[in-house]
Amino acid sequence: MWTTLSSIFPYAIAYTIPLLITALGGLYCERSGVTNLGLEGLMLVGYFASAITIRLLEPTMAMHPTSLLILGLVAGVVAGALFSLLHAFASINLKADQVISGTAINMLAGAITVYLARLISGSGNVRIKMGIIRKNIPVLAKIPIIGPLFFSQTYWTTWVVLIIWALSWMLLYKTSFGLRLRACGEHPSAVESAGVNVHKMRYFGVIMSGALSGLGGAVILITYSGEFHGSVAGLGFLSIAALIFGQWKPLGILGATFFFGSATTIANVSQVIPSLSVVPPVIFKVFPYVATLVALVLFSKKSAAPKASGQPF
Amino acid sequence: MKKKSRRATSSNAFLVAVSAVFLGLIGGAVLMALIGSNPFTGFYYLFRGGLMNIERVGNTLATATTLMLVGLSVAFAFKTGLFNIGASGQMLIGGLCATLVAHKVFLPRPLFLVVLIASALIGGALWGVIPGFLKARFNVHEVVATIMMNWIAYWSIYYFVPAYLKGPSLETESASIAVSQSLRAPWLTKLFNGSYINYGFFIAIAAVIIIRFILDKTTLGFGLKAVGSNRFCAEYAGIKVNRNVIISMMIAGSLAGLAGLSFYTGYSRNMQIGVLPAQGFDGIAVALLGASNPLGVLFSSLFFGVLQSGKGFMNAMTSVPPEIADSIIAVIIYFTATSVLFQRFWDRITRYRRSRHPEQSEEE
């Protein structure tokens, strides 16, 4: 059992990280008062942009592999942020229906990325030569129990994402800026009367969601995927589920994404591990969505959802 | 405090739709030009691919069938103020039930068709009524609930089809349904020179008429629309809001289930796993462009049907990737979402014209 656990744990973490960073992006957005169903599409845009950047710069060989990967991540972040401006403009300036705008973002991203990817290769798949090499953290990996679980075979992006998560928690809960941002999602007119520009705050929230989702997509590419193939297979929607299941709180989404990431990993490996194959994998795959529905029912009396989320101001 | 965007009134809904389509086509043209193709040639082959002969017209109608039913589903829920983003999942479950019947049930043809249709209807209705119930009873937002239901359907089918309906060759799709057990009809296939058109098209047309009748001529429809325009007012007038929400989602789900029927047992005759059908989202575009009106849905689904069925031919004749059709549809959705822009624009023009020719505007 222990060997099973310690062998699948790094995979569960690798799978959790893109979900975490995307859900965190969603958290910024919803907390500022804009519903964002376009996370799936924004992830896809980041996924695509980093694939294309790395692929185009690879042949030049002028760069250290790691700096190439960093450049890929940056490309994903920038592309996601730029693409999210479409959602920001529609939902903040034009007061459009945010659900429809988010759906349009998903469809647009799904179509345009593959459209452009076909210019590189006929099939629309963009493969990169090398992703991140997993490493054991020098001293920490030697710690019994925790070492093998958390500090061996890790990707450095995992630590980047965790640092961003910690900084976001500080920004949202320990600064006046964070307080204002959260207030924009609860009672925007009160914030406006205190002299804060609600539109600017909401723009910040939406752009953060784009940037972080783009980062999530780029992380998928350079960690476990290694190839852009036109879809992130519902991870953006899974992030939305995690955001709800985590009740719109940073610690909550950390737990929720890890929970969901583990369930998916178990489903993926359960056929090869005898002790897990007694449970049909469909149970693990369906679990996050059912759990989210159950959570919504349980918390329906006192929902923690930002009160003004989805309402134009 | 709530500033709601103004909904399109029927007089300018048409103008908004036309503007959105126009901008969508311009967006498509820009994308074609971006990769160095001539947009005019691209569009020529796109429309030619959808319409050039009787077989292709048949395929266009078959593609439009699914879009029409999904569009009706989304539009019907819109009328009750609900956003059914779960048509994909309802399609999958409806399609799964129908595929099961097609493989396992053997009856005389007319009776078989009734059972086939009923199975898809029930499957879709079940997948729609759950979010409806959660909304009515626990106030769970239907958008979130239907998204979750989509992925539950996606993963259920991912494991169910290989286990119980596996085809002889591929692990990733179900066995092909025999023509005699499908929605295809030999006389229709012959009439349209071997195209994919099937009985689904007549089901879709009938659904348009029935939904129009329900919405415009029945007490049920009146109640549903009343809940959609102002649920508090409806409640005050004695309309059972919760019951209407559940009924609305049930009917929307069954329409999407029929879309699954037309697609999986008529158009493709098998089910692929690992695909959330894109038609579920294209249907949102169909409903929006058709201003949630059954007749509007009919016409907009035909338009999108041409785009979707012509893209393969265009791709074969030019260097434009087939995703151009999906890009155009997505741009159209984006611009219908931001329709406030054109509403302002057209309102201003109308006002300007009225101020110049007051007597003309009387006649309009």
Image: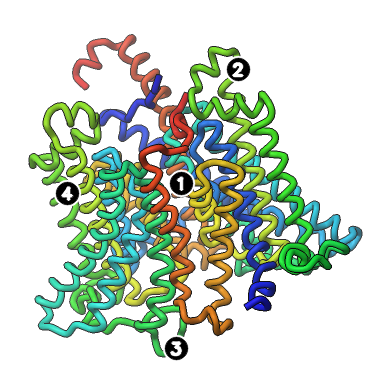
Count neighbours of disc 3 (C-alpha within 10 A) and say few if under 14, some if 14 to 19, many if 20 or more. Answer: few
Q: Which mark is residue A212?
A: none
Residue ranking furthest to the front: A144
Residue B328: percent from the left, percent from the top? 47, 49
Q: List x then y, in percent, for residue A14.
A: 67, 63
State the mark number for residue A103.
Answer: 1
> Splitting the image into 4 quarters, where does residue B104 fall?
bottom left
Question: Residue type at mark 1?
Answer: Thr
Residue that appears at 65% across and 40% down:
A82
- Left or right position of B210 against B274: left
Q: CA distance from mark 3 to mark 1?
A: 35 Å
Q: Are marks 1 and 2 on the same chain?
A: yes
**Which residue is painted at 60% across and 54% down in the image?**
A19
The N terminus of chain B, quarter of image: top left
Q: Up-down: is B323 above or below B328? A: below
Asked whether residue A81 appears in the rendered view, the answer is yes
**What kind of residue is marked 2?**
Val
User: Are discs 1 and 2 less than 8 Å apart at CB?
Assistant: no
A79 or B142, which lies in front? B142
Q: In the figure, is residue A148 to the left or right of B276?
A: right
Q: Quadrant of residue B223?
A: top left
Query: Is B301 above or below relative to B240?
Result: below
Q: Confirm whether circles 2 and 4 share one chain.
A: no
Q: Which mark is residue A196?
A: 2
Task: Tell me whether the residue at label 1 lies in contact with that at label 4, contact meaning CB atoms closer than 8 angstroms.
Answer: no
Residue that mark 3 sits on: B169
